[in-house]
């Protein structure tokens, strides 16, 4: 009897669970998001919807849907994403074209497709789908990427098409993220340095031209450099954000005590939720949220490094790109809110208000959890690559 019990205990010790650190970190960020949105959106919800908790209630629905979606996604093997990469990209590109035709326009940007009470943002879906597709491309064409010009030029041509669709919305922030993810995967895949330098020069020149020929982008750059010069015009949002940070100081004024959420700071519960976090929770609160995002990024990069040593390229590239995605979104969002970068319409992962962003971020976390699970149970590399 005792021997049988010992065997059961030995078996139990070898049961592999999903990474609890990633799960706990993601859930904690979502909890912080719910608290912040309930505070930051009160004034705007009351003014525009007549219900102070309108956005808070919607976020609770988004969280419920996203968590259920995430649970389903963790049960899908990484091989399924590899096989479905091209169809997924086709769906994402179809939505990107559709939003330009029937999309809802807000602040001169056509980025949302209204489906009843839901606003779908195709650009958010495209980011993760591009990670999946381009990771599959890099793993299938690894030798071409490393040793032939065509392996580098082909994805660049595809990227130009995606960039065109994003600029028509326009969504320059998402374009920056997608471009950085592409270069990141190519770098990890071993593309030559000379190709990088030539392409980066081209991208820099194209970016400069896009800024020069679009007056609102010039205003964003100049307001970012000196927002106080036109504090009631192009620099208004950034100056209000900086004042919110300054008012919060080291420890903040307490949850619910923000002044700038009362109509002074536009987009307080979405793109500039970090400012409200800084005002209510102070520098310490902002650092804590950055630390939580950093945990997910670090976990993803470490996992990618370990997997790529085993040659399981697809899963390694996906894990790396998800880490880069979280890192870029966090840096750009906080950088824009704090005046370190030009203003961009990018959300803070798992924290900012929005159903599309939240579902995609939870989806990314679920894929990361699944890849980690497969690596620890030695299920990686079960399908062949066409190298």
Image (cartoon, rainbow, N blue to C red):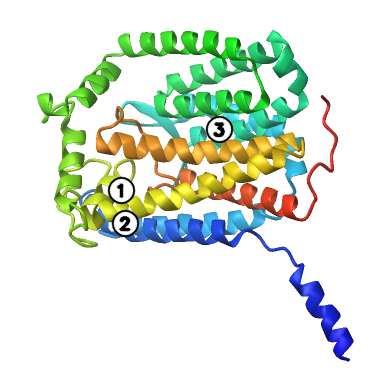
- Above/below status of 275 relative to 131: below
Please tell me which residue lies in front, 86 or 107. Answer: 86
- Nearer-N-terminus badge (3/2): 2
Q: Quadrant of the C terminus?
A: top right
- Nearer-N-terminus badge (3/1): 3
Instruction: Give the residue pinned by disc 3.
Output: 126
Q: Which residue appears at 75% of the width and 71% of the height?
A: 13
Q: Secondary structure at mark 1?
A: loop
Q: Are marks 3 and 2 in contact (CB under 8 Å)?
A: no
Q: Few, some or many C-alpha atoms within 10 Å of disc 1 (few <14, some 14-19, many ≥20)?
A: many
* Residue 193 located left or right of residue 40: right
Please tell me which residue lies in front, 86 or 6. Answer: 6
Q: Which residue appears at 18% of the width and 52% of the height?
A: 248
Q: CA distance from mark 3 to mark 2?
A: 27 Å
Give the percent coordinates (x, y) of residue 250.
Answer: 21, 54
Instruction: Give the residue pinned by disc 2.
Output: 36
Q: CA distance from mark 1 to mark 2?
A: 8 Å
Report whether residue 170 is seen: yes
Give the percent coordinates (x, y) of residue 254.
Answer: 21, 62
Instruction: Give the residue pinned by disc 1.
Output: 269
Q: Quadrant of the N terminus?
A: bottom right
Q: Few, some or many C-alpha atoms within 10 Å of disc 3 (few <14, some 14-19, many ≥20)?
A: many
Give the percent coordinates (x, y) of residue 31.
Answer: 41, 61
- Above/below status of 107 relative to 14: above
* Residue 262 located left or right of residue 137: left
Q: Which residue appears at 71% of the width and 42% of the height?
A: 307
Q: Secondary structure at mark 3?
A: helix
- Nearer-N-terminus badge (1/2): 2
Please tell me which residue lies in front, 161 or 341. Answer: 341
Q: Are marks 1 and 2 in contact (CB under 8 Å)?
A: yes
Q: Secondary structure at mark 2?
A: helix
């Amino acid at each position: 009897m005792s021997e049988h019990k010992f065997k059961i205990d030995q078996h139990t010790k070898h049961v592999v669970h999903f990474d609890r650190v990633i799960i706990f970190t993601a859930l904690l960020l979502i909890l912080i998001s719910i608290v912040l949105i309930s505070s930051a959106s009160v004034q705007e919800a009351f003014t525009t919807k007549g219900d102070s908790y309108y956005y808070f209630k919607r976020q609770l629905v988004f969280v419920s849907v996203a968590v259920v979606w995430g649970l389903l996604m963790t049960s899908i093997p990484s091989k399924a994403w590899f096989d479905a990469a091209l169809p997924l990209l086709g769906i994402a590109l179809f939505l990107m074209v559709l939003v330009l035709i029937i999309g809802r326009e807000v602040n001169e940007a056509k980025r949302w497709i209204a489906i009843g009470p839901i606003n779908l943002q195709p650009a958010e879906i495209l980011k993760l789908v591009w990670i999946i597709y381009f990771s599959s491309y890099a793993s299938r064409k690894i030798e071409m990427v490393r040793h032939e010009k065509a392996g580098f030029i082909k994805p660049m041509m595809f990227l130009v098409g995606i960039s065109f669709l994003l600029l028509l919305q326009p969504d320059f922030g998402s374009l920056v993220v997608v471009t950085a993810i592409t270069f990141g995967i190519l770098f990890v895949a071993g593309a030559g340095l000379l190709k990088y330098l030539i392409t980066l020069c081209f991208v820099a020149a194209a970016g400069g031209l896009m800024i020069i020929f679009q007056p609102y982008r010039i205003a964003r750059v100049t307001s970012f450099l000196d927002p106080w010069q036109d504090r009631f015009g192009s620099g208004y949002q950034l100056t209000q954000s900086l004042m919110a940070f300054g008012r919060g100081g080291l420890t903040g004024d307490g949850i619910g005590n923000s002044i700038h959420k009362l109509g002074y700071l536009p987009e307080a519960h979405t793109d500039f939720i970090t400012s409200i976090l800084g005002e209510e929770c102070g520098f310490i609160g902002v650092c804590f949220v950055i630390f939580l995002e950093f945990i997910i990024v670090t976990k993803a990069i470490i996992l990618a490094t370990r997997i790529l040593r085993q040659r399981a390229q697809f899963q390694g590239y996906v894990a790396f790109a998800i880490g880069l995605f979280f890192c870029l979104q966090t840096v750009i969002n906080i950088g824009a809110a704090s005046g370190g970068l030009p203003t961009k319409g990018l959300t803070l992962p798992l924290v900012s208000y929005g159903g599309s962003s939240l579902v995609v971020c939870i989806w990314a976390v679920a894929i990361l959890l699944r890849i980690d699970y497969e690596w620890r149970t030695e299920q990686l590399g079960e399908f062949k690559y066409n190298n």
